[in-house]
Amino acid sequence: MGFLVPSPVFCPHAFVLLLLCFTSSALLIGRNETDRLALLDFKSKITHDPLGIMRLWNCSIHFCQWFGVTCSQKHQRVAVLDLQSLKLSGSVSPYIGNLSFLRNLYLQHNNFSHEIPAQIGHLHRLQILALHNNSFTGEIPASMSSCYNLVSLILDNNKLIGEIPKEFGSFLKLTDLYIDDNNLIGTIPPSLGNISSLQELWLDDNNLFGNLPATLSKLVNLRVLSLFNNRFSGTIPPSMLNLSSLRTFQVGLNHFQGNLPPDLGISLPNLEFFSIYSNQFTGSVPVSISNLSNLEMLQLNLNKLTGKMPSLEKLQRLLSITIASNNLGSGEANDLSFLSSLTNATNLQHLIITQNNFQGQLPPQISNLSTTLEVMGLDSNLLFGSIPDGIENLISLNDFEVQNNHLSGIIPSTIGKLQNLEILGLALNNFSGHIPSSLGNLTKLIGLYLNDINVQGSIPSSLANCNKLLELDLSGNYITGSIPPGIFGLSSLSINLDLSRNHLSGSLPKEVGNLENLEIFAISGNMISGKIPSSLAHCISLQFLYLDANFFEGSVPSSLSTLRGIQEFNFSHNNLSGKIPEFFQDFRSLEILDLSYNNFEGMVPFRGVFKNATATSVIGNSKLCGGTPDFELPPCNFKHPKRLSLKMKITIFVISLLLAVAVLITCLFLFWSRKKRREFTPSSDGNVLLKVSYQSLLKATNGFSSINLIGTGSFGSVYKGILDHNGTTVAVKVLNLTRQGASKSFMAECEALRNVRHRNLVKVVTACSGVDYHGNDFKALVYEFMVNGSLETWLPATDEVRGILDLSQRLNIAIDVAHALDYLHHQCEKQIVHCDLKPGNVLLDDEMVGHLGDFGLAKFLLEDTLDHSTNPSSSIGIRGTIGYAPPEYGASNEVSAYGDVYSFGILLLEMFTGKRPTDDLFNGLNLHGYVKTFLPEKVLQIADPTLPQINFEGNSIEQNRVLKCLVSVFTTGISCSVESPQERMGIADVIAQLFSARNELLGT
């Protein structure tokens, strides 16, 4: 072959570097010079080098000593080029093909883009080519087949298109071929069957289709065949199942069909991972599978398999078995005998047989399963009998689900010993007796499902100890007595509290208002009496409220007008009276309103939900009138009052005059009182909210010691302190008054915090404005101390400092922030725009609840800018922080709630990608564009890799939940951060979308 010679026209950077090197080192000759020029041209194609690696490639040292370059000792030619994980961006120079002695090329884990140069095919000595985890585009060069010494070809996790080159069949020594997670199309070329040396073939996550070529059965050394998530169809060639060296056989999420061969466990004796989930396989599970003594993962779920499961007693290394969503089961009493055989699998972690036709009793041997078992899913079968004694032996169990069967007997109190349980699902069975109070010992529970199981007695007050519960469902039983107030102290309840269809009595405790995060609350079909407590208005996250079929009386509390996110109200079949509240018609999100069979009277409103007679039911209220014609109510005929006598008119006039005089005197008195107070209160530049002195704050913070310093911001520093008079731990923000705008920021924050109060806003304790010991002005704000600091300190995640926020925690924090914005934008007397939403201004308390703080740039608006986006708020400078501030703030002086929505969108994308909006990774894009590029197909590629939930192990249903949740979150973030303010998602819709994403994650 001939060598390419870079010219000054083609590569100006290399030419300049060559001139610089001319005077500082001797000119090398021959092929060494060819290597040096090739490396310089490679350098010239690097467009972004945040670590400054390429600066080390200079003429002061020989190129064999350049970073990442290793030369052969004999010829001083480049043998290894290792530049992996250096955050490099750009393209790969075609002159890479001139490094004719190159054996190993490592460019993985960077941001290289453009096409892979065809000149790589000139590297006949190349043995390892690692280009994975980049953004290479275009087709895979067929010329690579000329690298006949290639052993490992690793191209996964890029953006490659086109077909797999049929020329790859000419590789003589290739053992590993990784081209998964790209956008490849077409079929597997039969020529791949000629690579007799091949040991691992990874083609996952592409768009490949068609039948598997029978020639693959010639790959006698193949250990791994992974075709997961493509569009393959047809049957598996029987000859392929004779590849006795196979250890991993993964073909899940395709369209394969046919029966599993009866000799599967004999012809593939070395299998460790066997996954065929989400296909269309039929027939029975072969008995020979019991011979796979090395098997660790068995995934047969989501197929059409039938018949009896064979014994698995020889599968002693089994970690996970998932056979859910088939038609397995013979209808015989011993259907579950295979569970007894699993007692030999001493490291078993997941056992999931849900949604099949298994019959029979749970064998007592399940109590002898491995103590490492974490998930046992037996739900949606035809099981009967009781839960075996000894279930408490499974000490690692965190998910135990047997719902939707025919189990009977009492609920074993020993379940309360399973201290690691997070999900307990016993619903839709035929249990008897009471709910054991020992369930209150399960303090890690997040989901407790005991609905429709025929239990009686009262609700155990001990359930109030389960302070991590997100969902509690006790509906459809024979539970009596009153609702323990402690249940309403579970502030963690955020998804569902369903106590409906029981025999509960008494009144609804006012403590129900503690459930500020709850979305669904149902007590339908009980005997609850008294008035609807006005404290329900504090449940600001409610979307569904079902109070029907009880004995409530009185009127609907006007305080419920604050439940702006409600979607369904059901007050039917009670004894409610009075007029229908007009605020119902102002709820934009309200879709269903049932007021039927009560004693309401007066006119039915016309607007909002009342426009739709199918969405609103008022039947059974005989004193109602008006409304739209669809209600078929009589018109409202209000009688004119009788004419008043002269004496009555005079009396009314005199009384009205006296009242007017009294009101006038009262107003004058209030005016005089406020004037006097202003005379003795410092001006707005003085001691606003002065309750603590400079001296007390100096003492509280140990002299504003650096040891107490917990953060710095635009206008000052924040210190941890302990107030002397009550020992309260606080955060003290001391303003740096030398900074322009600091005083204005102080006043803005005082004004904002004086007018707002919400559970998701940082609480201000007091403020101080005076002078320090040197006579200098001193201003400080004192806040409630947040134990877990700011969200910024948790992003990106790190095990060493803070720990890792999981998917559920991040969703909860995002929902908290969204609630805070909804309050500022829609529920304050004057609309407030925060103007500086970012992770550093989201603080986390000891329960990881998010609180929005730092109102130094907040702005009060006189009109609703959500409806009038072009209405100028004021003339100001640019507000916010680079990366989070919306684009319109840089182009004009208009501030609107749309800007906060944009910042929230960026915050949301940052929380779930782990990447800051100013990250160098984006290379001309922004965080919005970066995420949008990958959705929805490659959501895992952009998700924060530290998220525990994305490291999938086993359950495909859980995987799908996580994927759908992430897609929903990222879609919401993109909708919030579009460039046009008017096209951004409303904050109420954001809250609804995030709740929906959380429900998707939890499978509710």
Image (cartoon, rainbow, N blue to C red):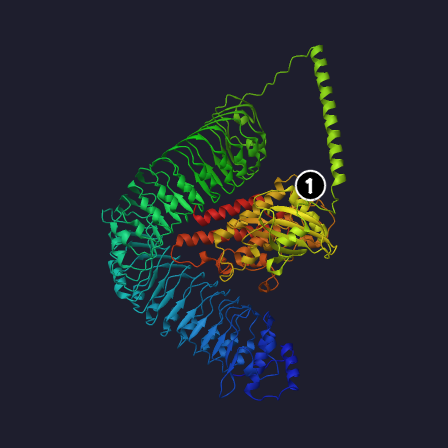
On screen, residue 445 versus residue 670, left or right, reads left
Any part of residue 200 in sight: yes
* Residue 540 placement (x, y as % from top left): 54, 40
* Residue 437 placement (x, y as % from top left): 36, 41
- The residue closer to the viewer here, 443 or 880, is 443
The quarter of the displayed image where residue 293 is located: bottom left
Graded by Cα atoms within 10 Å as few (under 14), some (14 to 19) or many (20 or more), the crowding at tag 1 reads some
Q: Is residue 640 above or below residue 745?
A: above
- The residue closer to the viewer here, 990 or 486, is 486
Query: Which residue reaches farthest left?
Result: 333
Give the residue type at disc 1. Glu
- The residue closer to the viewer here, 824 or 272, is 824
Q: Is residue 35 above or below residue 167?
A: below
Any part of residue 986 in sight: no
On screen, residue 665 versus residue 936, left or right, reads right
The quarter of the picture where the C terminus appears is top left
On screen, residue 424 versus residue 584, left or right, reads left
Q: Secondary structure at mark 1?
A: loop
Residue in the image at 55% along x and 82% along y: 65
* Residue 895 placement (x, y as % from top left): 68, 48
All told, the count of numbered labels is 1
For mark 1, what is the residue?
863
* Residue 438 placement (x, y as % from top left): 35, 44
Q: Is residue 312 above or below residue 329?
A: below
The quarter of the displayed image where residue 610 is located: top right
